[in-house]
Image (cartoon, coloured by chain):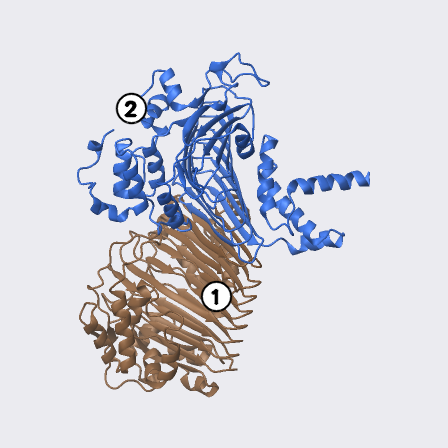
Chain colours: A brown, B blue
Amino acid sequence: MVDTIDTLVEREYAFGFHSDIDTEIAPKGLNEDTVRLISAKKNEPEWMLEWRLGALRHFLTLTEPTWPRVSYPPIDYQDMHYWAAPKPKGPSPTSLDEVDPEIRETFDKLGISLDEQKRLSGVAVDAIIDSVSVATTFKATLAEAGVIFCSFSEAVQDHPELVQKYLGSVVGPRDNYFAALNSAVFSDGSFCFVPAGVRCPMELSTYFRINAENTGQFERTLIVAEEGASVSYLEGCTAPMRDENQLHAAVVELVALDDSSIKYSTVQNWYPGDKNGKGGIYNFVTKRGRAGNRAKISWTQVETGSAITWKYPSVILQGDDSVGEFYSVAVTTNHQQADTGTKMIHIGRNSRSTIVSKGVSAGVAQNSYRGLVKVLRSAEGARNHTQCDSLLMGPDCGAHTFPYVEVRNDTAQIEHEASTTKIGEDQLFYCRQRGLSEEDATNMIVNGFCREVFDELPMEYAVEAQALMRLTLEGAVG
Amino acid sequence: MSSDTVAPEVPTGSEEGQGVPAALEALLAAGDRSAGAWATEWLAHNGLPDPTAEMWRYTPLDSIVAELGRTTTGDPTGEVEMADLDRLAGRHGSTRIVFVDGRYSSQLSDETGRSDSAGAGSATGPLPPGVRVGPLGAIASAEGAGGETTSDAATALLGTWAATTAESAGADDGFSVLNAAARNEAAVVSVPAGVAVGSPVHIVHLRTGSAEPSAATLSQPATILDIGAGASAQVIESHVSTGPGVTNAVTRVRVGPDAHLTHVRVQDEHAEAVHVGETVIDLQRGAHLESASLSIGAQVARNGLSVGLNGESAVAKLSGLSILSGSQRHDTVLSIDHDSTDCRSEQDFRSVVDDRARSSFCGHVRVAHGADGTDASQSNRNLLLSRTAQVDTRPWLEILADDVKCNHGATVGQLDDEALFYLRSRGVPVARATSMLVAAFVAEITERLEPESLRHAFDDAIRRLDPDVVLTTAAVRSDAADTEEAGS
């Protein structure tokens, strides 16, 4: 057991390379000048700058939250670059072929060859390196269907009325500490708009990567599905190996109008730090969706990376008969800490939500589920079922469950179940008796434990997620 | 213990009082500051718990503090008739010791069971020799273990665990320290090693109202239970009152190696009262605890219960029930610490909430690193009977060991539609069917209670629920009996 854990901690972070891309970087520090610089770099309209400055002024009045069950040294928000962009070699690319070959190579290493994606998988990709969107594939195909899928900066330029209407409508610029920070300094992100009645013809995808040193990545994603529209969106993340911690404070807003559906899947594999807990990404993310009448929002996440994860993808079930779902696998090993879960706010009548959370903890990691199910007085007939299970691998890790349930309507039916166990000796014995190695058996059992969540992922991500799990837990049998 | 022991940088001036609610300030000024020197000092510095503290966020602290402020004006009458006492607290077993407004009342107490009055004779006979039941002061001075203060006496007689001290008080322990500052005589039940006490010991803490009906009174009772190695006992602790005001109760319990304690705590205070209770239980190796917390009365109540499984193979079986109507607000906060190997804890807490009442529950189970073989289960079930009723629940697990079996479940909802349909399809009117199901929900907790007289504590509370919908358990029982008779 001890041996196998040793093998585990010696595994390498497969995506830890650093690309030598020429980067344009803003001076360190967080102040109005930084915000003005970012806004100017992006050639933003006045309203956008004011919005940012409002968020910054509010942020400066806030204190960092301490309630998550994670610990880290204080972050110096002044000792950080808030803008880093791959320096353009000439005019900005007009087609994929003009994208800087080194950037293309970076994505090839990540296994998301933009060309490949384009030709074979039919997945439209918006790739973001350090803060700036470098390429969006399949724009034309999407445009035919009326779908707008572009970087956030382009959206601000090309569709200001849409951005102005929906930006901050779900996660306001004063929402919380990290959301306020993001609102002030966000540099780019993805914007997706699916007009009424349109079923998005392909899976949309964003790939995030932090490349430069000492930078924080603050991207902002806004997805709007108009009445009767539907869209499935995938997000993946990696970062190079560095000794210092890097901050990632993103905001994702989903707006699902009446009868629409949005499915948002994440495979998060930011650099988790080395075996001694040195380095790694601080992933402090605010994700929230608002569902109208009969609308559906589904979050699926596989969280294997980051030194610290702090995120609670939530759904405001505002409409009658709206549906919210949260499927999560969070794996922590070595010194990783995760405090993640969801919030389901039931406002509409007959709103329904499902929460399935699977936590796997190994090494000396700490893995917490924290969730809120709130049923307001208006939510006649609301229904929630929550299942959160934790699997402990090794005597030094921790698995915690902190659910909050607040019910103000007597017709609501709320159920919460949770269990914490280690991998059963008898399960292992059964598998080994049939000739499986301890490692294969463990993998099989862990995969079975997480099956319910993997089944919710789009097919190509389900494969990636399982591979990632195997990699993350390599050797952590016991 | 004097104020000298407090670090010099602790200011006692009024500027520090900024963090202290005005009510507390007035209370401390009104009392004898010299009484519990360290405690008043501590309170001036730390104040009452912060409403944003996680373990207090659902407790209506503002209402508690407001009522506390009112108590500086009301003087308790101290008058109780035996009939009132019987009506309020009931009689459970032959030994009943009664404290009125924090002071022992020998007149109201029934000490026939006490060993030092052996010979008085009673149906169940005297308590076994060596068992000490009564006010701490009397017991301590009889044994020459007196001291300057209550906590001195408790420490001298029973050890440091029995008292709240500057060292043991945590940041959120303001109410326990306030209780210590009052220096009331603690009710003590102390059972020596190996002794089995056959009949239940009933401790009643009664707070009298003020002569002026609108004024509020304050009572701060303390209870200490010490069960020696291999001993066994059952203790019933009742909190009742005859008028509005605040009861701030502290109970400290130690269950020795392989000892067995059944502890039933009944809070059935005046409808306008505020009750704050903090029970801390230390379970040693092989100790076995069965605990029931019944929360019925009081407008605002907080029931804090901390159980430490501090020795291997200790067992804690905890249950609780709240039946709330009107605009009652009750908060139950449990903290279960598995610090040893092979311990087991079970929790079964339920609430029935009607009208505009609000019930909150927090069950925080912690399993320490190395506490292998832990088996912890937790269940919190809540029944909502009205559109405006509210329930908050936090079934928490914090686990730092891997060889554990922990699960928890929480439900909030109405009565089961299918069960209702089943009964109605067999000709049971909807009102009767509803009452049967509520009674059954409650009975799963109450039918375990001994002696049987305890089970009727709920009849009144159930009667207060919507009369169109709910009948009393007793009525349902007799009704069932009638049906059986008619059938035979």
The residue nearer to you, when weighing A45 against A369, is A45
Q: Which residue is mark 1?
A: A462
Above or below B269: residue B329: below
Mark 1 vs mark 2: give the one in front: 2
Q: Residue furthest top?
A: B119
Q: Is residue A367 visible?
A: yes
Q: What amino acid type is highlighted by mark number 2?
A: Glu
Q: Is residue A139 left or right of residue A389?
A: left
Residue drawn at x 37%, y 63% is A269
Q: Is residue A475 visible?
A: no
Quadrant (top left/top right/bottom left/bottom right) for the N terminus of chain A:
top left
Residue drawn at x 35%, y 44% is B69
Q: Quadrant location of residue B475?
A: top right
Q: Position of residue A431 (x, y in %)?
A: 53, 49
Q: Quadrant location of residue A337?
A: bottom left
Q: Which residue is mark 2?
A: B148
Q: Chain of mark 2?
A: B
Above or below A195: residue A396: above
